[in-house]
Image (tube, grey):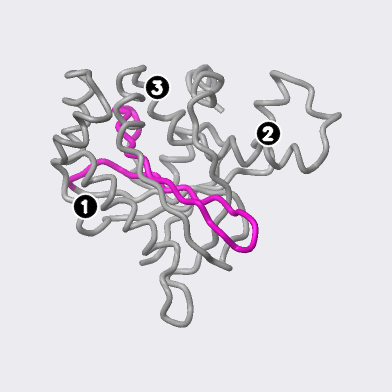
């Protein structure tokens, strides 16, 4: 984990959303919508938020933040160029162990910490460009809940567009196969998701990036 990326961890976690689990099937069997399709719906919802003056008037009174958000809505999100699945590596909690002793925690609580950590990934990246940028991406964060039996582990799906901002979609597993999903634009200027290797290097080795075949 790079020093600069680790430096924004604490503040970013304070405003992160709680996400948790996903799998790699695209789409789900039997004709029902899979995670890929649910992710696309959330991207479309986030785009609509960013492109709506009425929505922005309700949720932000800052002209500067509105200006940043409006840039999101100018992109073309009709079809992603690439899609990556991001999952934590086995030593992902190492950064947290450095800040606090987790040895006395139960496995359940450790998993909760791990889940929240991967859930905060988009927030942490956006925080690298400052508070205004983070606030702008938070304003048009889209969410939904659905039922799925696909979920296996905490992760983020990153939708990358040729003429638009990347969008990170995270899925949270709840009880009785319910899933909470949320999408956030990634607008950090230093983040260039050109390949799995580039993403892993930027995130400092704590996350595994795998390109999903559409």
Q: Please tell me which of labels 3 and 2 falls first in the chain.
A: 2
- Tell me the element at label 1: loop
**Which mark is drawn over residue 93?**
2
Q: Are marks 1 and 2 in contact (CB under 8 Å)?
A: no
The residues colored magenta run 163-191
Q: Is residue 143 magenta?
A: no
Q: Please tell me which of labels 1 and 3 falls first in the chain.
A: 1
Q: Please tell me which of labels 1 and 2 falls first in the chain.
A: 1
Which percent across, then down, holds residue 163? 17, 46
Quadrant of the rendered image containing residue 71? top left
In the displayed structure image, the side of residue 157 where residue 186 appears, left or right: left
Marks 1 and 3, how far apart at CA:
24 Å
Which percent across, then down, holds residue 143? 40, 47
Q: Residue lying furthest right in this view?
A: 104
Which residue was labeled with disc 1? 77
Residue under the point 16% across and 50% down: 76
Q: Nearer the viewer, mark 1 or mark 2?
A: 1
Front-most of 24 and 46? 46
Which percent across, then down, holds residue 150? 56, 66
Residue under the point 34% across and 24% down: 135
Quadrant of the rendered image containing residue 167? top left
Q: Residue lying furthest bottom in this view?
A: 30
Which percent across, then down, holds residue 122? 43, 36
Q: Nearer the viewer, mark 1 or mark 3?
A: 1
Indicate whether 86 appears above or below 59.
below
Front-most of 21 and 203? 21
Which residue was labeled with disc 3? 128
């Amino acid at each position: 984990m790079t020093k600069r990326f680790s430096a924004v961890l604490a503040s970013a976690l304070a405003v992160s959303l709680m996400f948790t689990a996903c799998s790699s099937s695209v789409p789900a069997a039997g004709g029902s919508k899979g995670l890929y399709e649910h992710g696309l719906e959330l991207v479309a919802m986030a785009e609509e938020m960013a492109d709506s003056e009425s929505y922005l008037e309700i949720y932000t009174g800052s002209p500067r933040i509105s200006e940043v958000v409006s840039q999101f809505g100018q992109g073309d999100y009709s079809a992603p160029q690439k899609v990556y699945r991001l999952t934590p590596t086995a030593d992902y909690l190492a950064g947290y162990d450095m800040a606090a002793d987790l040895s006395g925690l139960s496995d359940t609580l450790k998993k909760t910490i791990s889940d929240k950590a991967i859930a905060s990934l988009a927030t942490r990246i956006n925080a690298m460009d400052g508070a205004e940028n983070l606030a702008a991406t938070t304003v048009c964060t889209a969410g939904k809940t659905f039922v799925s039996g696909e979920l296996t582990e905490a992760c983020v799906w990153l939708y990358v567009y040729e003429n638009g901002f990347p969008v990170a979609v995270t899925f949270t597993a709840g009880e009785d196969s319910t899933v909470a999903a949320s999408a956030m634009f990634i607008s950090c200027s230093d983040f260039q998701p050109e390949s799995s290797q580039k993403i892993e290097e930027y995130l400092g080795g704590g996350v595994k990036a795998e390109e999903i075949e559409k």
